[in-house]
């Protein structure tokens, strides 16, 4: 019943599922691939709020015909998502308590992740923040490549996630690259030694 009321959609890399300001009429579940949720401020600067992986629910805080998305959901790589009409999904939540509990659990984890990032940005240096973020990303969106782990994010996107500048991220990655911890490419980071990465920044 739950799956039969959903529509499956394939989203090509860098295409948007929805854009900031769009009417929030659907709820989405990522079933394959990765999605970044980002926001553009009044000055035009972009910040990544979170990254979504398979099993994550993408739902606006205000849904319905008058609600709008306050952020943009963009595929990092080719993604498959399930979508429900917002009203249909709310009816399913009422009908299936297990679904409601799962939704609460998913959003609770997202809130915990954002609290961790906020605390780090307020209390820790850039090297520590960046190393912690990279290690978290390994479990979230990392892919194994020839014994190493690869993250499909640009250095600019890492800067947005850690609240710093592209120059600072590039400089720190270059230091770690000289030590053999990582290999930084244009849109990917290859991590050779996650433990050494954390130890060096602590």
Image (tube, grey):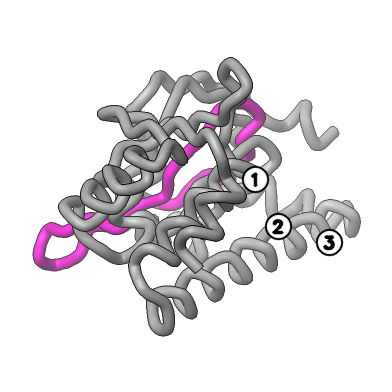
Q: Position of residue 89 (x, y in %)?
A: 69, 48
Q: Nearer the viewer, residue 69 or 123?
A: 123
Note whether 160 is above or below 9 in the view shown.
below
Task: Tell me how far mark 2 sits from mark 3, CA to CA.
Answer: 9 Å
Residue 101 badge: 3
Give the quarter of the image for residue 107. bottom right
Span of residues in magenta = 24-47
Residue at the image position 44 percent from the left and 24 percent from the top: 77
Residue annotated with mark 1:
56
Q: Nearer the viewer, residue 44 or 163?
A: 163
25 relative to 41 in the view: left or right: right
Label 1: element kind: loop
- Residue 26: in magenta span: yes
Q: Do residues under tags 2 and 3 come within 8 Å of each other at their CB atoms?
A: no
- Residue 201: in magenta span: no
Circle 2 residues within 10 Å: few <14, some 14–19, many ≥20: some
Residue annotated with mark 2:
106
Circle 1 residues within 10 Å: few <14, some 14–19, many ≥20: some
Circle 3 residues within 10 Å: few <14, some 14–19, many ≥20: few
Task: Tell me how far mark 1 sits from mark 2, CA to CA.
Answer: 7 Å
Q: Position of residue 15 (x, y in %)?
A: 34, 27
Q: Nearer the viewer, residue 35 or 123?
A: 123
Q: Which is the main secondary structure of the residues drawn in magenta?
A: strand
Residue at the image position 45 percent from the left and 63 percent from the top: 201
Note whether 36 is above or below 191 in the view shown.
below
**Given the current orientation, which residue lies at the most extreme front position?**
179
Q: Position of residue 55 (x, y in %)?
A: 70, 40
109 relative to 17 in the view: left or right: right
Note whether 72 is above or below 17 in the view shown.
below
């Amino acid at each position: 019943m739950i799956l039969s009321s959903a529509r499956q959609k394939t989203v090509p890399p860098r295409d948007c599922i929805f854009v900031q300001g769009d009417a929030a009429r659907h709820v989405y579940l990522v079933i394959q691939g990765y999605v970044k949720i980002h926001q553009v401020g009044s000055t035009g600067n972009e910040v990544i709020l979170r990254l979504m992986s398979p099993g994550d629910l993408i739902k606006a805080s205000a849904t319905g015909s008058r609600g709008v998305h306050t952020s943009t959901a963009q595929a990092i790589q080719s993604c498959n998502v399930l979508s429900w009409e917002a009203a249909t999904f709310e009816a399913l939540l009422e009908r299936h308590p297990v679904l409601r509990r799962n939704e609460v659990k998913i959003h609770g984890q997202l809130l915990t992740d954002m609290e961790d990032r906020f605390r780090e940005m307020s209390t820790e240096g850039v090297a520590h923040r960046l190393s912690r973020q990279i290690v978290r990303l390994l479990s979230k969106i990392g892919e194994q490549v020839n014994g190493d782990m690869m993250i499909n994010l640009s250095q600019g996107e890492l800067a947005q996630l850690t609240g710093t500048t592209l120059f600072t991220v590039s400089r720190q990655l270059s230091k770690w690259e000289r030590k053999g911890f990582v290999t930084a490419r244009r849109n990917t980071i290859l991590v050779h030694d996650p433990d050494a990465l954390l130890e060096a920044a602590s």
